[in-house]
Image: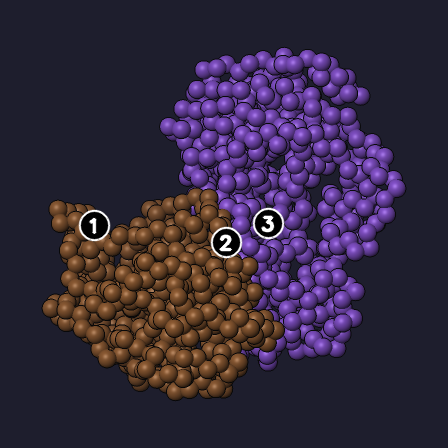
Chain colours: A purple, B brown
Amino acid sequence: MRSLTILALLLGAAPAAAAPLDPTMINRIADQAMNHGEVVDTAAYLTDRIGPRLTNSPAMRAAESWTQQRFRDWGLSNVRTEGFEFGRGWSIDSSSVRMIAPRPLALRAIPIAWTPATDGVLSAPIVVAPIKREADFADWRGKLAGKIVLVSYPAPPKDATDPAFTRLSDADIARLDVYRQPVTDDEAGDGWFRALSFAKKLDAFLKSEGALAWARMSSRNGGLLHGNGYLHRAADTPALPAVEIAAEDYRRLARLAKAGEVRLEIDSRVRFDDSDSKGYNILADLPGSDAKAGYVMAGAHLDSWVAGDGAADNAAGSAVVMEAARILSALKVKPKRTIRFALWSGEEQGLYGSANYLERHLASRPANPDPAKAALSYDFKLDQYPLTRLPGYGELAGYFNIDNGSGKLRGLYAENNLAAVPMLREWLSPFASMGASTVVARPTGGTDHQFLSAIGLPAFQFIQDPLDYGSMVHHTNVDTFDHLRTEDLRQAAVVLASVLLSAANSDKPLPTMPLPTKPKLTDPFSYEDPDRLD
Amino acid sequence: MRSLTILALLLGAAPAAAAPLDPTMINRIADQAMNHGEVVDTAAYLTDRIGPRLTNSPAMRAAESWTQQRFRDWGLSNVRTEGFEFGRGWSIDSSSVRMIAPRPLALRAIPIAWTPATDGVLSAPIVVAPIKREADFADWRGKLAGKIVLVSYPAPPKDATDPAFTRLSDADIARLDVYRQPVTDDEAGDGWFRALSFAKKLDAFLKSEGALAWARMSSRNGGLLHGNGYLHRAADTPALPAVEIAAEDYRRLARLAKAGEVRLEIDSRVRFDDSDSKGYNILADLPGSDAKAGYVMAGAHLDSWVAGDGAADNAAGSAVVMEAARILSALKVKPKRTIRFALWSGEEQGLYGSANYLERHLASRPANPDPAKAALSYDFKLDQYPLTRLPGYGELAGYFNIDNGSGKLRGLYAENNLAAVPMLREWLSPFASMGASTVVARPTGGTDHQFLSAIGLPAFQFIQDPLDYGSMVHHTNVDTFDHLRTEDLRQAAVVLASVLLSAANSDKPLPTMPLPTKPKLTDPFSYEDPDRLD
């Protein structure tokens, strides 16, 4: 209710009455980032030296230690972890997939995350059995024993008629400034639930049929690989080894299988680590002077997928958050509100780290009554009410997330928080010459501000230039440091540090949104499409 | 002189007085290609089943046998090979390159063609020593012993702002219709000669310094690999194993080497085959009714590089040439002139196959007086005069080459043969609805019509839609069947078969160009740029 009042007040008061930041501080931040910056070194260490940081993997553990040490080296306070139940560690020692008939050929392939190792070299003929839903199982019953099952439809490549690398024009950004009406239906999260459930059912079906392993086709062309997999809980560990094969190689297998026997050798040397089933968020504070004023927070997820080095997703964002911390600490700022820096874990598998922060500090809601759903991610709580504020709810005065690749910051998504737009615009106004001054209403999802926005808090994500993130880099084996742009990382550190300091010093906190209660269905007259696969 | 006369006559006579092809034959050709076509099967067999066809490799030998058998199956006459001295066979059994320090990581890499195998697993630290020219050797003397030398400058990636996949618009094609004045200088071919010489000098230098192997960076991003190498003669076989490393991986190595020791393991299991040093062109004829009328010819190179399956370069062109042969044979055409089908070998290393055809049948000229150059490709004869016609010169009434990827045919490059333009336009006129009716003056190079055009013969190349050939496929490990477009292959077969039949039946032969004599230098006042590297 309080947030509603503030919303009403602020809607009538633009520009917002936020205390402007000491302008010399902006220049000192820029000087620190541009002339004394470490963001490039930080990103290089996380990617080149530590490498991919799959949640709970040995490399992620190394990153958890190293990032805490950096925060401490830079003088941050209360550097700490917060753990949450996640599942098994998993890493790839080595792997190879070779076609051995009708001709020998090394294939580009990667084990799918959290699938088990082969027991030495697994050699078997393939069967191309496109299976997309449980109803497809019947078509393949009795045909898979002793086989490596290629479960993807070998779809032909689409014409890549868009540029791989882009930056946003002013017109592109202007098109983002659209209030999106929330869409609510009683099937929310069901697609994701069905996908997770299907992964388990597919493994069980293939195992029961006597299949030896399975393979899917990469969703991208050009030999790119991903290897994403979601069965990270010990109880869910699949029975069969599985690999993702490059699209070009997969399609060749499928064509050759039309003409005769095709045999593969799969040698998947992967390793589970059950020494600690918890994932850990890393938190570090720059203390505020007014204990009652709460805190503002910047966050990015430190975990990544395993095919590349997790550079654009999201060493870039992590390094920028860390650099903002370093800069503000080096400048010995004394903000009114505490500034908190968060490096999340378990983002890639379901925003587990930020969801844990939410449930630990911000708000509670009932579990999903379906025990199968209740055991999964916070997605399956989103339609559960009532939502109840925890004591920490009112302390979080603003959250800023970075997770749209490594392109420079172009502004902020206000995430439908209309009342926040004028304040955010004012804080970004010094950065027009850096291309970062736009605030757009539109909401975004799929990363760690999402659940925070969804409980009414002022939680935002930065707009970023796409670069080659969507076309080539996202979750692939070329998510490497060289696809970052060092000048973009420095720019982002300047903008983030300044926005954080503005938010921390602002006389008025950013407006919240109403605490959600169970919404009316957007379209109460709709029916579910029986062909829907999500 | 005869050709000059014809040129003058034809320039004054447009449209050319060529006998139109029986129009029903065009429809029968289209029916054969579209409703009974085998071009897709042919391309699939060459790529999926046989795979990469490096000149003189075991797979190329298989392709030489299989293509001859297909020509025979289809009823072609005088199916034969013509051999030429080339060098060693070379193929990859398997290879792996792993970083073992500072962290273990499988790298994407490929042995460079015609480099020797490692003796088991070669393990050594790297040194990043960008070497581009002989003058750079001095900088690295005494620093390379026991090392794997990374010889490329780790250039950062460029923004990929152009679409990867394109088709030509009418405006694009119109821009190609430009007569290009020939450029003649006394340095012709010198860049290529320096590059080949430098490859040998680099190997000798690294060997003499005690380096163990070397690596270069892929020229493309996205993990794409090529592996091109040119030291295929037995006497030139390098001393050191060498690999090409994916750009992302190479740059990572170079960054890590700034901070400490980086070690690699290279296991390059490659194999030489010295059972036959000759490359072989495949020739097949559809006999003409008039023995004095000579022949027309279509050609494409059957050989490929080894990283992919040689699909767009040039199983596509080979399959289209073969399909035109099949169609015309199936239709039992009785052309006035013989129609010859040529599948060249040794194209990728220096147009060796088509150059051999030229020297065997068409024209002779003195050897390059420099013995080192004389031993290399026909490029180093191009500035040697006088050029003397062989008896077969006058028999070749037209040559049509396909080697611009797998995109559909959009017309013909007249290769500066102005007089041929009207005849070619007439022959293409039925194919406007297929997008293939344009004739442009502009010359093209780099493939097997080049030397034929250069001795004055009417030798042309087809314009083709680029698709993703230049951006992603050319010489890479994704030059695979799925990057072809089957509908484009069928279209090309129709157009090629029809043009060949028109040329074979034409009352008048295509005009030749004057037999070249030593040209005046285009710019007699120029000096050589001392920074020139070619």
Residue at mark 2: chain = B
What residue did someone put label 2 on? B167
Is B232 or A30 nearer to us in this picture? B232
Say whether disc 1 or disc 2 marks the residue closer to the N-terminus. Answer: 2
Tell me whether marks 2 and 3 sit on the same chain: no
Spot the residue most to the right.
A525
| Residue sitting at x 50%, y 28% | A435
Is A140 or B281 nearer to us in this picture? B281
Check disc 2 and give the amino acid type.
Arg
Judge depth for marks 1 and 3 and give the one in front: 1
Q: In terms of secondary structure, where does tag 2 sit?
A: loop
State the image coordinates of residue A14 (x, y, percent, origin top left): 65, 14
How would you rate the neighbour count of disc 2 (Cα within 10 Å): few for under 14, some for 14-19, many for 20 or more? some
Mark 1 to mark 3: distance in Å? 51 Å
Q: In terms of secondary structure, where does tag 1 sit?
A: loop
The reply, left or right, for residue B66 in relation to residue B242 is: right
What residue did someone put label 3 on? A55
Residue at mark 3: chain = A
| Residue sitting at x 68%, y 37% | A450
State the image coordinates of residue A208 (x, y, percent, origin top left): 74, 72
State the image coordinates of residue A465 (x, y, percent, origin top left): 52, 36
Tell me whether marks 1 and 2 sit on the same chain: yes
State the image coordinates of residue A377 (x, y, percent, origin top left): 72, 46
| Residue sitting at x 47%, y 59% | B437
What residue did someone put label 1 on? B532
Is B374 or A117 nearer to us in this picture? B374
| Residue sitting at x 37%, y 28% | A35
Check disc 1 and give the amino acid type.
Arg
